[in-house]
Amino acid sequence: MFQPKHFYRELELLLHERRGGPLSPEWFPWLVEEIVSRFGSELMIDSGRVYEEDHEGFRLVHGIGSRDPNSVGLTIPPGYGPLRQVLEHRVFIFDSTVEGQSAELECRLGGPESAAFSVDSAPRRVVGFGLKPGWQRDDLDFALQTIRNAIDLQVKVQGFQMDIAQAAEIQQALLPQVPPTLPGFDIAARSVPAEVVGGDFYDFIPSEGETLVVAVGDVSGHGLGAALLARDTVTGIRMGAERALRIVEVVRRLNRVISRSALSSRFVSLFYADLEASGDLVYVNAGHPAPWLIGDRGVRRLDIGGTILGPVRDQHFRRSWARMDPGDALVVVTDGLLERENARGDMFGEAGVQEVLFRLHERPALEILDALFAEAARFGGARPWEDDTTAVVVTRPR
């Protein structure tokens, strides 16, 4: 006797047995064979077939138990009546009374009594089964609807996962793979997304003469939407640097583009600076956590510029100046580091960053960077990173 709960539980176990998923070409043949083998006696099915859509119709690419072993490769034309029924209803059960069947064709496949369902994969597929005498319509309809829904869900989830993975690859490709070279300076950077993709970014762009553009930003939120806006922002920064636009003009144009974006519900904080080999630094801070410039002259915070990018289309921005002397360190972080929480809900905060800088600001840039992440990780214990976390360290050794 057919038991729906038992069938559903066994189907779930089956779908988690094999890796690769429904977007791989070998997955559907494996699944059909397993369904015939495991549920054949329960559902009264004795054969199975997989069809894939091409320019001529639906081509039979795999069969088990077909009456004609040479039927693989056979194409069902799009106008064939039973095929139209399957595509229209998504699940359809055929008996000898259904009109439009070709007796010759059906006998080559699974016989005049069969069932099939369609799958919105790429390419689109139809999965069919031949039926043995004694099948029950309600049981079979429940089982096929359940199988189709489960497969469609896996198709959507795997497609989404592939999109996310591709977005992560794109985002990682945007980040500099190695620190840049600027005579007399030591540079290190790192970005850790809270999810597969994140909204933090940093970039280094050689500019005219011995000048390096340093940009660090944080898109509100995290995930795919934040990553897409981060990509667009980095692209805009690079275009502005290549055209040798004035620093305020680059930020102003970025703000206007972001405010018009389809993702305009998000905003971007940005620290953008031109660092010269002489140590002169021109910067705009658009709502970003104020970077630290620490050295013999104490601690200075670079906080002049304007508000975050996005909410106000015609926002005014100002530039400011600073100087990196020998022995100085410039440290730029995002909220993910500052807002790292421990079990009590306390934040790592500016105090945590400054404690590291006071101890290590004359050490190599990578050592400072490693210490910042290590101390913040220790502070949070075993907790995962709650937000995308980025830090850029630039030192000027004596």
Image (cartoon, rainbow, N blue to C red):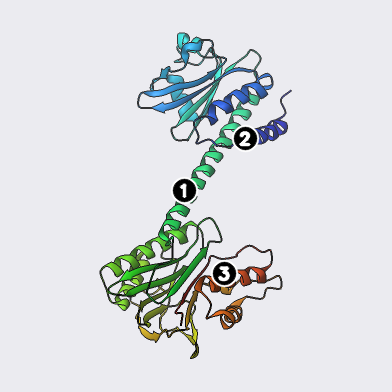
Q: What element carries label 3?
A: helix
Mark 2: few, some, or many residues within 10 Å (few <14, many ≥20)? some
Q: Nearer the viewer, residue 231 or 94?
A: 231
Residue on which disc 3 sits: 370
Q: Where residue 264 appears, x then y in whole percent?
A: 41, 65
Residue on which disc 2 sits: 15
**Residue at point 40%, 86% (across, down):** 322
Q: Indicate the quadrant where residue 236 lies.
A: bottom left
Q: Is residue 221 visible?
A: no
Rendered view: 229 above or below 337: above
Q: Where residue 360 appears, x then y in whole percent?
A: 57, 79
The residues bearing labels 1 and 2 have C-alpha atoms spaced at a distance of 21 Å
**Residue at point 47%, 9% (across, down):** 103
Tell me the amino acid under the disc marked 3: Asp
N-term mark: 3 or 1:
1
Q: Where residue 330 appears, x then y in whole percent?
A: 47, 79
Q: Is mark 1 on a helix, strand or loop?
A: helix
333 with respect to 238 (left or right): right
- Observer-side mark, 3 or 1, equals 3
Tell me the amino acid under the disc marked 1: Asp
N-term mark: 1 or 2:
2
Q: What element carries label 2?
A: helix
Residue on which disc 1 sits: 163
**Residue at point 45%, 71% (across, down):** 187
Question: Could you tell me how many numbered marks the image carries?
Answer: 3
Tell me the amino acid under the disc marked 2: Leu
Q: Residue 34 carries which label?
A: none
